[in-house]
């Protein structure tokens, strides 16, 4: 897909949250019966409960880390809490979903007070199982620089 047509580039996920990457695995995210796709608008009432997350692939010995962040906190015009960490799950076996991983930071439903916020789901392929500690706070989390998440990015989804 040409870079200018990529929804992650158009939505400024590439740049604000991630560096450019090549997708290597399928990531599916859904809230009840609503599938999350890049750029899809969802109301706060639709994202109250933890989503279902599925990981494609064919190797149960490969593990992934899932990160969900809001790069627009507290408001899109002044994102001084960028990025706000909503969820962090590690050691998710490939071919399964987030419910089979180790929840490091429990799911906190998005509650934007001002404007439309982007919620970004990032899936990292782990180099092996490892201990990951919860950050001291959720605000100002940095997906790009998080030392525990340096393995390569497998996939990303975002909703606005």
Image (spheres, helix red, strand yellow):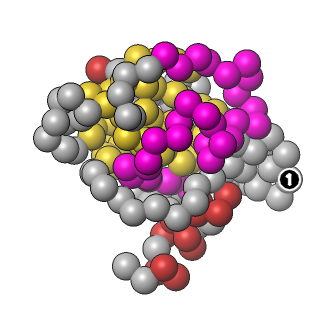
The answer to which quarter of the image holds residue 145 is top right
Magenta: predominant secondary structure element? loop
In this rendering, would 37 be left or right of 100?
A: right
Left or right of residue 71, residue 57 in this image = left
Residue 132 seen in the current view: yes
Residue at the extreme front of the image, as rendered: 127
State yes or no: residue 47 in magenta.
no
What's the magenta region? 131-160
Q: Which residue is mark 1?
A: 78
Residue 152 at x, y percent in the picture: 44, 47
Q: Residue at x 39, y 35 (%)?
A: 126
The stretch drawn in magenta includes residue 156: yes
Q: Quadrant of residue 11?
A: bottom right
- Residue 130, given in percent of the width and then of the height, sits at 44, 20
Q: Is residue 142 above or below residue 1?
A: above
Q: Which residue lies at the image location 72% right of the left edge and 50% below the top edge? A: 72
Residue depicted at 44% across the width and 49% down the height: 153
Quarter the N terminus occupies:
bottom left
Label 1: how many residues lie within 10 Å, few (<14), some (14-19) or many (20+)?
Answer: few
The picture places residue 42, in percent across and down from the top left corner, at 50, 50
- Count numbered badges in the picture: 1
Q: Is residue 11 left or right of residue 102?
A: right
Residue placed most toward the observer, 82 or 39: 82
Looking at the rendered image, the quarter that the C terminus falls into is bottom right
| Frontmost residue, 23 versus 84 | 23
Q: Residue at x 39, y 63 (%)?
A: 22
User: Can residue 34 be seen from the camera position used here?
Assistant: no
Q: Position of residue 70 (x, y in %)?
A: 64, 44
Q: Secondary structure at mark 1?
A: loop
Residue 134 higher or lower than 54, as above or below: above
């Amino acid at each position: 897909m040409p870079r200018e047509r990529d929804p992650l580039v158009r939505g400024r996920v590439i740049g604000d949250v991630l560096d450019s990457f090549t997708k290597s695995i399928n990531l599916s995210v859904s809230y009840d019966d609503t599938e999350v796709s890049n750029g899809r608008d969802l109301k706060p009432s639709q994202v109250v409960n933890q989503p279902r997350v599925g990981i494609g692939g064919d190797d149960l010995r490969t593990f992934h880390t899932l990160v969900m962040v809001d790069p627009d906190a507290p408001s899109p015009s002044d994102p001084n809490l960028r990025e706000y960490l909503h969820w962090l799950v590690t050691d998710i076996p490939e071919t399964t979903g987030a419910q089979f991983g180790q929840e490091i930071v429990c799911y906190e439903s998005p509650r934007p007070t001002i404007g439309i916020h982007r919620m970004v789901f990032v899936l990292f392929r782990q180099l092996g199982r490892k201990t990951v500690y919860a950050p001291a706070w959720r605000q100002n989390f940095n997906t790009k620089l998080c030392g525990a998440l340096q393995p390569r990015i497998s996939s990303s989804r975002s909703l606005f």
